[in-house]
Image: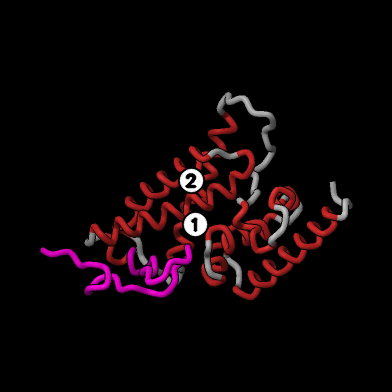
Amino acid sequence: MAHEEPGRGGVTPGARDAMGRVDAPPLRELARCAVRDPDARDLLLARVREMAVRYARVRLGRFGAEDTAQDVAQEVCMALVTALPTYEERGVPFEAFVYTITARKLADAQRSAMRAPTPVAEVPDATDDGPTPESVAVLRDDVSTALALMQTLPAQQREILTLRVAVGMSTDETAAALGMTTGAVRVAQHRALAKLRTLLAQAGAGDVA
């Protein structure tokens, strides 16, 4: 039996996706077709892997490593393949489903890393949420300073900036992933960016070490 091809009875080209590409089918369409269509499954896994790597890089921050981010993404893809046959859409964006898996796999990787006898200059007492440069590029200012100042934000605000700017989730997707309203996400993101701009200005003036 012929497989349905994206755009031909299976997954149809959609609007701009979370990573900024044009004509990429929404993840929910890919997920719906992935069980019976190998092409849709491969495209879904590629998109999910990219999202997972970006998220892991941000959350690992300066204590992370590229190998760990890639390992987490691989674990997410394997978990997704296992979950797809029984996955049911329940009004929650598929991106939120991916976020839940990725956050869990990353937490597992971080716990394992902290238990391993790997020599490091400093071991954080808690999960490091520092973003990659692209997650603060909207500020168009000194990236290294912004990364350090990111740690002064409340955890929820850091997570929102990670998902909205670094991973590329929409406001609705971020709200679903974090169990918030879209309005609350917009307000928190605005406050977080405003706070970072203020701190960056103070740092530039020498008021922040």
The quarter holding residue 153 reads bottom right
Q: Earlier in the sequence, mark 2 or mark 1?
A: 1
Q: Answer whether labels 2 and 1 touch (C-beta < 8 Å).
A: no
Label 1 residue SS = helix
Residue occupying the point 50% across, 43% down = 69
Q: Tell me the amino acid under the disc marked 1.
A: Tyr
* Residue 183 screen position, x and y as percent: 64, 75
Residue toward you, 152 or 114: 152
Badge 2 local density, few (<14 within 10 Å), some, or many (20+)?
many
Q: Which residue is mark 1?
A: 99
Residue occupying the point 65% across, 63% down = 138
Residue occupying the point 62% across, 61% down = 160
The magenta span reads 1-30
Label annotation for residue 114: none
Residue occupying the point 44% across, 47% down = 73
50 magenta-colored: no
20 magenta-colored: yes
Check the picture and name the quadrant holding the N terminus.
Answer: bottom left
